[in-house]
Image: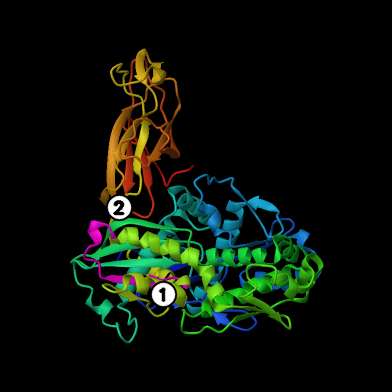
Amino acid sequence: MDVTKLFVAAIDFGTTYSGFAFSTRDDQIAVYTCDWKSSDLTSSKTPTTVLLDKQQKFKAFGYEADNKYIQDIIPDESMDEFYYFRRFKMTLHNERLSLDTEIKEECGKKMKALDVFCMSIKYLKEEVIKKLQSRFLSTKEEDIQYVLTVPAIWADQAKFFMRKAAEKAGIAKDQLTLALEPEAASIYCHELRLDVDKKQNKFLQTIKPGMKFMVIDLGGGTVDITVHQRQRDETLEEVIPPSGGPWGGTAVDQAFIDFMKDLFGADVIDGLKEEDLEDYFHLLHEFEIKKRSVKSKGDDNRDIVMQMSVTLMDLIKKLRGGISSHIKTTKYKDFVSVEVQRLHIKAEIFRDLFKSTIDKLIQHLRKIFEKPELYDLKNVIMVGGFSECELVQMAVRNKFGADRKIIIPDESGLAVLKGAVLFGHQKKKITKRILTKTYGIQSWPEWDPDIHPETKKIRMGGTDRCKDVFFKFATIDDKVEDGHTSSQIFQALNPNERTLECAIYTSTDPSPRYVTDPTCQRLGNLIVDLPKLKDGETLEIEETLVFGGTELLFRAKNLKTGRVFETQLDF
């Protein structure tokens, strides 16, 4: 057992839905989730929406935020006095992310993303504490180890961003662990030995040492794919680097909006959002329901029928003339019709909304299955909310199911959340991971005219040196054990400096030469305090990177004083 805290609580902060779960140190497998109530349903997750007042103070989260905004604020036309954010997690899927990155709320007002994430995580953290204290009266905040989920395909910057937001939300640094979403799902499926369905429910009881299995985590924003191999000690080892892309359920939502704009005009749909935001959200909500229930070709070819609001119909009449007469002028004339405030869409057209997203997933999976490491992979597990879509299931089964088992476990939408709790108890469950970047630091070796360009030549401490040299610590595609360290000792070159900035860089190149190469990116830095040196005295700094976990640890040690500086990196 890795964790000494009484409880592990996981927060699954998703693109469309979020939730939390927990278990005790003494009964780790008994994972409890929280029920969230809306007006007409109860679910294990709540929408990832947050409502703030005009002073940017927190008002509500999830269903409560939705209801307040739609039922109270929109009818009063007081949207300008509030900030309403939804589906903002994908902001972090961006190489240019910084702690100052801003995001827009639904009416276009901007705020720092860090503050929005912080308030959301703080709310969920406080709900965790309330729920634990209601079940275990003597629970203290220091009794809880928190686990926060992040996509495996996110860049290091996004993971650091989430850690910063969580720490700002009041979670102590040593009480916080990041879990990679598909890894959490892998642990869930492996640890609980789930019965998956009547035909294939023996699979998870027969994962033997040496067997490989793929987890496809289909979330709202991203698809994350990992492959693990079970070891003799029941730990898991990564077989290929995590991969994926922005092909989650929200990509289909965007395809629906694009379809509606193509059908009636962007001015109509944008006008609906501007004139009647409540009706616009109802349209998206109804699509969400239809999206979950759509059947594969041949199973059900009845029209998909969606209610049209009075505002939408009036806008179409105003901007396009008659609704039916306009539809007859479009390429959809044989596939779409309107009958008494109801939009009828042929099933084949509705299924086409999924095509681009599913095609990208299938194309990516095809490339993965071509890897020689996966020639003996026979088991594929699909998890995440979007995995419940029958069209996605059938597409994967039809393309890859002939010689592989395609498994959708019960509660597939909760696999990441519950697996993150298990990961929090056993952080060493994943013993080896594959690096997705080359890591190194900036160095200044002595000038060598045979290998260094003139443009990199500088004079330091009476010696000609080459600036910006990439000193490599680890190489892309290296398989490293959890806790693997790589160290190097450098001299502080300027005796007059009181601090030393140690910068770390990443590259997609196995052997970058300079940190200024196009493939390189500055990841972060660590500031090391330096003592005052006597004339002629030198100072050595040992710089260490700790790999293999879900986060990268950077450490610098002053060998003169023994003082150690450590961080999960600022950027």
Tell me which segment is drawn in magenta: 370-385
Which amino acid is tagged 2? Ile
Q: Establish if 487 lies above or below 221.
A: above
Q: Is residue 159 visible?
A: yes
Front one among 445 and 409: 409
Q: Amino acid at mark 1?
A: Gln
Precedes in sequence: disc 2 or disc 1: 1
77 w.r.t. 290: above or below: above
Graded by Cα atoms within 10 Å as few (under 14), some (14 to 19) or many (20 or more), the crowding at tag 2 reads many
Please state the horizontal and vertical placement of residue 105, each as a whole percent of the image. 67, 58
Which dot marks residue 434? 2
Q: Nearer the viewer, residue 493 or 141?
A: 493
Residue lying at 33% horizontally and 79% vertically, measured from the top left? 194
Q: Is residue 46 left or right of residue 548?
A: right
Identify the element where label 2 is drawn.
strand
Q: Position of residue 504 (x, y in %)?
A: 40, 38
State which quadrant residue 252 falls in.
bottom right
Rendering coords of residue 569 (x, y %): 44, 44
User: Given this view, does label 2 or label 1 mark the residue nearer the observer?
Assistant: 1
Q: Is residue 381 magenta?
A: yes
Number of numbered discs visible in the structure rendering: 2
Residue nearest the observer in this picture, 178 or 531: 178
Q: Which coloring applies here?
A: rainbow
Which residue is painted at 67% across and 78% down in the image? Answer: 337
The numbered dot on residue 170 is: none
Disc ID at residue 393: 1
Relative to residue 259, is residue 357 drawn left or right? left
The residue located at (53%, 75%) in the rendering is: 348
Instruction: Give the distance between the C-alpha atoms of the residues marked 2 and 1, in whole angstroms.
Output: 28 Å
Q: Residue at x 55, y 78 (%)?
A: 347
SS category of the residue bearing label 1: helix
**Left or right: where 216 falls relative to 219:** left
